[in-house]
Structure formats: structure tokens, C-alpha cells
Image (spheres, grey):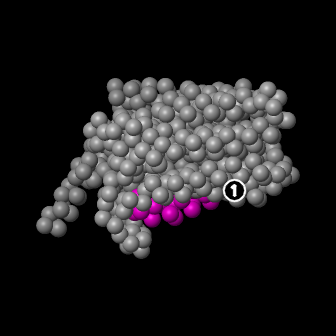
Amino acid sequence: MQNKKSIYAWALYDWADSTYATTVMAGFFPLFFKSYYAANLDATTSTAHLGFANSFSSFIVVLLAPLLGAIADGASLKKRFLFLFAYLGILMSACLALVGEGQWQLAAFVYVLANIGFMGSNTFYDALLTSVSSEKEVDFVSGMGFALGYLGGGLLFALNVWMVQDPAFFGLADKAEAIKASFVLVALWWAIFSLPIFFFVEEKRENSKSSKETFLIGYARLKKTLKKIVSLKGLFLFLAAYWLYIDGVDTIIRMAVDYGMALGFDSSGLILALLIVQFVGFPATLAFAKIAQVWDTKKMLFVAIGVYLIIVLFATMMTQVSHFYILAVMIALVQGGIQALSRSYYSKMIPHEYAAEFFGFYNFLGKFAAILGPLLVALVALFSQNSRVAIASVAIFFIAGAILLYFVDAKKVACEVREALQSEEKAIY
């Protein structure tokens, strides 16, 4: 095995930044945005503004993704840019505690910057995986990061929930002060546990290129890969299906708490529901993957999409917070499963020697998927003035994704891709 110190240092970054995903992005910010930052707005309008903020931050990262990917593959700049983006996210997380009641524009602006820092840093974090592991160990090392992310994110979130439920015990005046303190705690946790990756992980040195060359190469690679994927109809069909249904998944992750608030549910109940997702999700994901091994990956993807359609339908009929707990369990049962199986199903279609090239576009598409769903919810909320109608619109992504996925055959696609790449190699030589 590679240097254990560098492996654990790398994996600890997932433990560090997952607290932002749980406490800020999925948990307290949507809740606090509606009840505090945007307290002067009606529930539907605040939902729209949160949707726009999520979409805009994802769009910025999508614009930067080709450049970030090229830089990550370039000359020893990964740790430097990881540091810059991570500490942008850390600083902005702490700054959320300084935003006052009713200052929703400032809160949205700081949140957008924090999201950019979080998502941007993960691009370079992923790129450093090859620096700490060999090809033989990469699955284990990557899995360790994933596991630590669930655990770290869940533990700090549980502490933060305790703070909000009993602020006096922690010497805090009220729930608002407790939530602001939680944002600062996320920043501290993220900052402290990200230090090992900077001190103990060494990059693989490669030939240096100028910044201009690196940027141009990034866009050239994206253009070349896009042309190749579009020409491979089966692969393109799967990626289109994936983009649609994963957009629905990401939208539910980002907008669920805001939707619960719009229905008038108590914030404490909503946060408890998020904890359910965090701690039920990990074993459920493992079980989901095990069933797929015995049964069939594509069939299990359809099961997950079907459950998500039931989730959306159930969400439109919720009337009490106990329904939200049921919804949380349903989400926890399939959220990790649909993400993990999508990746493994895709891996069956592409040759391993081209995995970096094709997975680069897959990850780019995953980031792009975080734009359309929240934007649709925001627009429907504005025009309908009805949060239930807005959340119901997410079903479009699951239905369309399932229809496209029906026409995908992984074995046929794998043959198609292999033949196309062999033809390309013959043409070159």
C-alpha cells in the first residue's frame, strides 16, 4: 500500500468538507434563509431566490470545470488551487454568521461564493486521488474518503442540531445564534481537518505548462470528448438519461428543507429528518449495491427512479411533519444507491484505459445537473405561487430520464464504444 499517512490525510478532506454539505447546503442554510435572512419575503418567493442561488453557483462551477480539470492535470497546481477554493468556502461559511436578519441578498451572495468554494475544491480533491493511491488501491482509498465524509458530516451535524435544539446549554441566546455558531463551527472543522492534505499529500510532478496553454488544453479536451460522446449514440443516450434523473435527485437534496418550511413545518422536525437521511443513507447505499450485484444494475436504477417518483408525489400531499420523516427514510433508501449505481453502470460501458477521459465528462455533467432542477422549481414557484406545484415539477426529470434509460443496453453500448475507439486508433496509425 502507498504511504498510509498520505492516504489518511487525503481521506480526511472528505471528513472535513462534508460538514458543509450537511450542515450548510442541505440543512441550516435553506431553513435559516426562509425564516431569518428572507423573513420579509413570502415563502414562495424565498424558495425561488434559494433556487436561483443554487443554480447560479452550479453554473459558475460548470463554466470553470474544463479549466479546473485541465489545471488539475497540469503542473503541480492541484494543492494550491484546492487550498484557494477550500478557504473561499471556509471563509464564506463563517461570514454567513455575520449576515443580519432580512439581508437575503447578501446571504444569497455569500452562499453562492461558499458553494463555488465547496464544489471547486472537490475538483482538485478528486484529482489528488492518483497521487496517494495506486490503480490497485484506488477503489479502497476512494471508498475510505466516501465513508469518512458520511461519518464526519453526520457527527458535526448531530452536534449542531443539539446546539439548535438546546442553545442555552451551549451558552447561546436562541436558535438563530445557534445556527450562526454552527456556520462558524463548519468553517473551523473544515479548516482544521483540511490541513493534513496540505502537509502530508505530495503531488505527482508533471511537465509544466503555461496558464494559457493549460486553459486552452482544457477546453480542447472537453470539445474533443463531447464530439466523441455525441457520435456514440448509446453512450450519449445514457448520459442524457443520467443528466435528467440526477438533476431531480440533486434538486430534492438542495430544496427539501426549504419546501418543508414553505409548508409551515417546524424547523426542528426538518433537521431531524436530515439526520435520518445521513445515518440511514450509508448502510442503505451498501445494501442497494449488494442487491444490484445479485439482480441487475439497470433494474435497480429503475427501482430508485420509481421510488423518487413516489417521493415527489408524496411530497405534494404532505400535511404534517411526521410525513417529512417518512419522506426522509424513503430518500435515504435510494439517494446513495442511485448515485453509486449510475457510476458503476457507466463504468461497464467504457474501456478502462479511457476511464479518465470519459469520467471527466461524466463528472462535468454531474455538476451541470445541479443547475436546471432548482431553476425549474424557482420559476414554477414564481409563476404558480404554489410550492406544491413547484416541487411536483421535479417529476419531469425522473420520467424523462427513465424513458431514455429504457433504451440503453450497457453491453451493446460497451461494444459500440470499443469498436469506435479501435477504428479511431486504426485511422491514426
Q: Residue 415's x, y, as percent?
A: 23, 49
Main SS of residues in magenta: helix
In the rendered image of this protein, does residue 188 appear above or below residue 46? above
- Residue at image x 64%, y 33%? 157
Q: Is residue 201 visible?
A: yes
**Kind of element beneath mark 1:** helix
Q: Residue 316's x, y, as percent?
A: 69, 38
Magenta-span inclusion, residue 9? no
**36 left or right of 425?**
right
Could you say which is closer to the camera, residue 244 or residue 111?
111
**134 left or right of 128?**
left
Residue of label 1: 110
Residue type (three-letter) at the residue carrying disc 1: Val
What residue range appears in magenta?
56-72
In the rendered image of this protein, does residue 46 appear above or below residue 252? below
In which quadrant is the N terminus drawn? top left
Could you say which is closer to the camera, residue 29 or residue 193?
193
Could you say which is closer to the camera, residue 12 or residue 149?
12
Q: Residue 291's x, y, as percent?
A: 39, 26
